[in-house]
């Protein structure tokens, strides 16, 4: 068997893992973020100053925010259920040290701190959890697209063939979800006085880089005879095309319907698509082609998974727009966000009930078809992850009340920070200048050039696969390659961020 066919077989015919294991894995990223924040506060408490060294900031961020995820999806995957508890215990230990050392300086009752915490004002224009969510989805996706080609990455985490819930199945939907959270319609960038379809024209122009990248990936994969999983998107289709066409279709829908009704559009799309799958031969066509023998003759047959899954991904995108609109409602204090967290927990519980009903009476989760169960699963888990990041931010706000003067990048500041600079940080607007950067946070660095980060990850993944026989690598060598790969991309983002460069040419 050739290397190409061996690697294709290595990532094919898989069934995914359990929802519980994926939920356990979701807790890792927020806990790593919390650990990083507590370490920075502890550093400030000990030395009376913030960590300003760019070199040490990058090293700390990579070792705490990225490296644990590399270990947990490879050599530590067998104890993945214990890892959240281990990291949480470590975080609790740091907080106890911070609180005990602070008590020696100023004796304030704990209940008084809690009371002040509820009244703490927060910048309603800046929601750090959105930035962190999008960055971590990008980081986790970049890790997985290379790690999946190594034997240390559990096969159950890879994309399921037809039905199943793999970590990488969630990653695709989460990428769509994260992009919709900051789309122009959510950020109110469209002018109400302009004609409705003018925003559609702008979106059409803004998606050409994705079309260009999709064509570039198609040509490079075919010319290099790179291994590919045909049943994932089809013969010619890829994720760049999916992202571009979903954005275009969403802009068209929002030019016709009000954006406040995005959730209704999402439900109708997902349910109607599932009804067609169950009542017609469309499901058999997606799974087995028009002749029932998996034919790939003709453009539609060749790319049936990529073309027809657009309906499901569009439903996820529209649902995420509604989530984004709800998040941007003015919540100027911790109390407002505490209430939002409680309401979100109720929504998440309802979504998981709907997921159980959908899997029992409609169809199991299938990323290949992007069916109703898949849409509900993606939205439920994305909301769960986002909620974890919000709770992490609130925990760090509480800790900063304990240690006056402490600061954590990509986290809410206590008080009323300047909204303009924060909004620019969130959107990574080209041409923004703030003089000397106040911090060199890796999350801000990646956020500023997210598309470039993802593009570099794809290019390096291809180069490593061409140069190395990944299927037969030992664990130590695999970890070295993965760490080198991620550190190099993060270093490039870090350098661009310190020079305040945004690579955006459209």
Image (spheres, grey):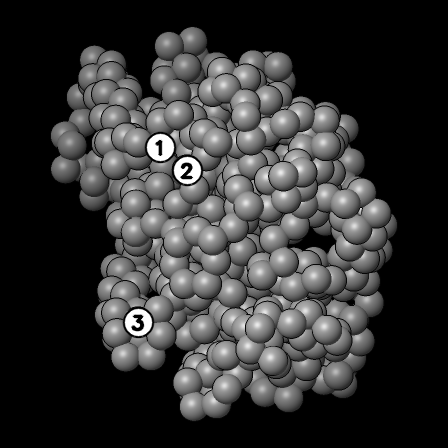
Q: Residue drawn 61% across and 81% down?
A: 290
Give above or below for 417 relative to 189: above
Q: To which residue does mark 1 refer?
A: 77
The residues bearing labels 3 and 1 have C-alpha atoms spaced at a distance of 27 Å
Q: Are marks 3 and 1 in contact (CB under 8 Å)?
A: no
Mark 1 or mark 2, earlier in chain: 1
Mark 2 or mark 3, earlier in chain: 2
Q: Residue drawn 50% across and 19% down?
A: 474
Q: Position of residue 169 (x, y in %)?
A: 47, 55
The residues bearing labels 2 and 3 have C-alpha atoms spaced at a distance of 24 Å
Q: To which residue does mark 2 refer?
A: 154
The residues bearing labels 1 and 2 have C-alpha atoms spaced at a distance of 7 Å
Q: Residue drawn 24% across and 17% down?
A: 97
Residue 141 image-quadrant placement: top right
Instruction: Determine which of the numbered discs, if any, sits on residue 359 in the image.
Output: 3
Q: Residues within 10 Å of mark 3 (few under 14, many from 20)?
A: some
Give above or below for 344 relative to 445: below
Q: Is residue 231 left or right of residue 411?
A: right
Residue 234 visible somewhere in the drawing: yes
């Amino acid at each position: 068997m050739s290397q190409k066919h061996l690697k294709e077989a290595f990532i094919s015919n898989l069934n995914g893992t359990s929802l519980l294991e994926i939920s356990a894995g979701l807790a890792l990223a927020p806990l790593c973020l919390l650990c990083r924040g507590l370490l920075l506060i502890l550093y400030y408490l000990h030395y009376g100053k913030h960590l300003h060294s760019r070199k040490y900031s990058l090293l700390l961020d990579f070792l705490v925010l990225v490296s644990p995820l590399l270990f947990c999806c490879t050599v530590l995957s067998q104890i993945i259920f214990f890892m959240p508890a281990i990291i949480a215990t470590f975080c609790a230990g740091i907080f106890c040290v911070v609180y005990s050392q602070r008590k020696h300086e100023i004796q304030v009752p704990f209940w008084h701190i809690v009371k002040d915490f509820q009244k703490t004002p927060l910048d309603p224009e800046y929601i750090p959890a959105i930035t962190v969510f999008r960055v971590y989805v990008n980081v986790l996706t970049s890790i997985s697209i290379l790690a999946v080609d190594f034997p240390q990455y559990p096969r159950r985490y890879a994309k399921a063939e037809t039905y199943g819930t793999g970590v990488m199945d969630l990653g695709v939907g989460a990428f769509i979800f994260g992009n919709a959270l900051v789309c122009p319609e959510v950020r109110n960038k469209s002018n109400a006085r302009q004609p409705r379809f003018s925003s559609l024209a702008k979106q059409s122009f803004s998606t050409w880089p994705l079309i260009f990248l999709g064509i570039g990936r198609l040509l490079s994969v075919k010319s290099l005879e790179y291994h590919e999983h045909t049943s994932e998107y089809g013969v010619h289709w890829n994720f760049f095309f999916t992202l571009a066409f979903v954005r275009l279709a969403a802009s068209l829908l929002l030019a016709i319907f009000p954006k406040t009704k995005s959730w209704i559009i999402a439900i109708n799309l997902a349910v109607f698509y599932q009804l067609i799958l169950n009542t017609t031969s469309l499901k058999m066509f997606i799974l087995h082609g028009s002749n029932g023998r998996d034919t790939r003759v003709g453009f539609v047959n060749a790319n049936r998974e990529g073309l027809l899954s657009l309906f499901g991904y569009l439903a996820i995108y529209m649902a995420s727009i509604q989530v984004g609109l709800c998040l941007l409602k003015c919540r100027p204090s911790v109390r407002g966000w505490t209430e939002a967290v409680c309401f979100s927990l109720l929504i998440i519980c309802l979504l998981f009930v709907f997921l159980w009903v959908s899997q029992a009476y409609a169809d199991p989760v299938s990323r290949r078809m992007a069916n109703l169960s898949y849409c509900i699963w993606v939205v439920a888990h994305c909301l769960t992850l986002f909620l974890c990041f919000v709770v992490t931010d609130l925990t760090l706000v509480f800790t900063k009340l304990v240690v006056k003067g402490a600061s954590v990048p990509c986290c809410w500041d206590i008080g009323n920070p300047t909204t303009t600079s924060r909004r620019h940080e969130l959107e990574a607007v080209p041409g923004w200048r703030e003089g000397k950067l106040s911090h060199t946070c890796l999350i801000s660095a990646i956020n500023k050039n997210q598309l470039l980060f993802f593009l570099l990850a794809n290019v390096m993944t291809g180069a490593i696969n061409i140069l190395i026989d990944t299927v037969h690598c030992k664990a130590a060598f695999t970890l070295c390659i993965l760490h080198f790969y991620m550190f190099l991309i993060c270093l490039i983002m870090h350098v661009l961020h310190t020079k305040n460069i945004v690579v955006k040419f459209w």
